[in-house]
Image (spheres, rainbow, N blue to C red):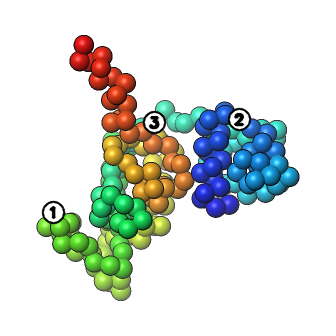
Amino acid sequence: MSAAVLRKAVSYLEEHGQASPAELAAHVLGGASLSPLLAGLQDERLVFDGHHWSLRPPPDELAILEMLTTGPHPGRHRIVEVAALRAGRRFEARVWWPRPLPKLLRKLGVPEQPNEADRAEGWLTLGAAGEAVRAFLNGATVAGFGYQPAFLDQLLGPSAPAIDPVSYTHLTLPTILR
């Protein structure tokens, strides 16, 4: 199934809790009669008990994830570094692209990437970096700030469980200021 279909299914189940195959197919595929196609939904967050689709409860474990990008627009810019921290262990990778890095990033300390023919240790394609960081996170909910959902989708897959603590400040800031 496509990432867009998976994203719609996860979003629908987050909102409704559970759904029959007909309900979920009507929402994500456009018709209840297409429910047999839901068998192709493969994601560790989805659970089908034979009667209803639902989301597996998120793990209690949190991991910190940080991404360095060439800019704020996922359509034009790209992820160049990924770092994560989970259970006291650290993951780091640089993401290789066919285009050279912007000069500003090199001035900020990001090393020049190698030529494709002789990639150095620690440089991964976006797909390989995504696989490696997903394996490292092992289902943990990621926390960080300023996430662009499209960058997270590129790296971790559609609708990855993530928390942006800055988005919760509007809930606590007024009470702190009183």
Neighbourhood count class around disc 3 (C-alpha, 10 Å): few under 14, some 14–19, many 20 upward: few
Amino acid at the residue labelled 1: Leu
The residue positioned 26% from the left and 18% from the top of the image is: 176
Residue in front for this viewpoint, 23 or 121 = 23
Where is residue 123 drawn, in percent x and y? Answer: 34, 70
Kindly give the residue lying farthest to the top in the view shown.
178
Determine which residue is flagged by label 1.
Answer: 108
| Residue 137 seen in the current view | yes
Q: Write down the quadrant of residue 4 in the picture.
A: bottom right
- When the figure is inspected, residue 31 is found, relative to residue 123, above or below; the finding is above
Determine which residue is flagged by label 2.
Answer: 18
Where is residue 86 drawn, in percent x and y? Answer: 38, 43
Neighbourhood count class around disc 1 (C-alpha, 10 Å): few under 14, some 14–19, many 20 upward: few
Which-is-in-front pick, marks 3 and 1?
1
Q: Secondary structure at mark 2?
A: strand
Kindly give the residue lying farthest to the right in the view shown.
33
Amino acid at the residue labelled 3: Glu
Which-is-in-front pick, marks 3 and 2?
2
Where is residue 122 drawn, in percent x and y? Answer: 32, 68
Quadrant where the C terminus sits is: top left
